[in-house]
Amino acid sequence: MTDNAAESSFRPDLPDDLSLVLDVPVELAVEIGRTTMTIRETLAIGPGSIVSLNKMAGEPVDLLVNGKRVARGEVVAIDEEFGLRVTEVVSAERRLELGKA
């Protein structure tokens, strides 16, 4: 079985010409929240400082691919590392709409 066939059986909805970009690296990031601070507040950050974010504890976090939200999920601990359990995937149509904004 070729790699292309394996990919097609894994995701039958993928067009064949997409196989040309399947090995292109992308950056994945999990965003737990954001905030706005003044330069004065930012310069005051030191060990032990707490920065409040715009999300509540336990609220779903965003999975970003190259800066665009593609999914949401919950943070999990796997041994001594963090991971993300995906609970919602943004539809391809919605991702295209968000990309135009």
Image (spheres, rainbow, N blue to C red):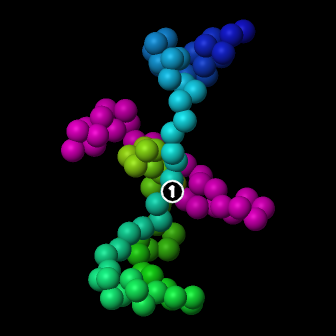
Please tell me whether residue 95 is drawn above or below residue 64 in the rendered image.
Answer: above
Name the spot of residue 2 as percent of width and height, x first: 68, 10
In the image, is residue 90 part of the stretch drawn in magenta? yes
Residue reaching furthest right? 79
Q: Is residue 48 left or right of residue 2?
A: left
Q: Residue at x 33, y 88 (%)?
A: 40
Quarter of the image for the N terminus: give it: top right
Who's the residue at 56% across and 90% down the image? 48
Q: Which residues are magenta?
A: 74-101
Q: Percent x, y for residue 5? A: 63, 11
SS assignment at label 1: strand
Q: Position of residue 63 (x, y in %)?
A: 48, 51
State the residue in front, 70 or 20.
20
Q: Is residue 46 visible?
A: yes
The answer to whether one can see residue 69 in this image is no
Toward the left, the furthest residue is 101
Q: Which residue is mark 1?
A: 30
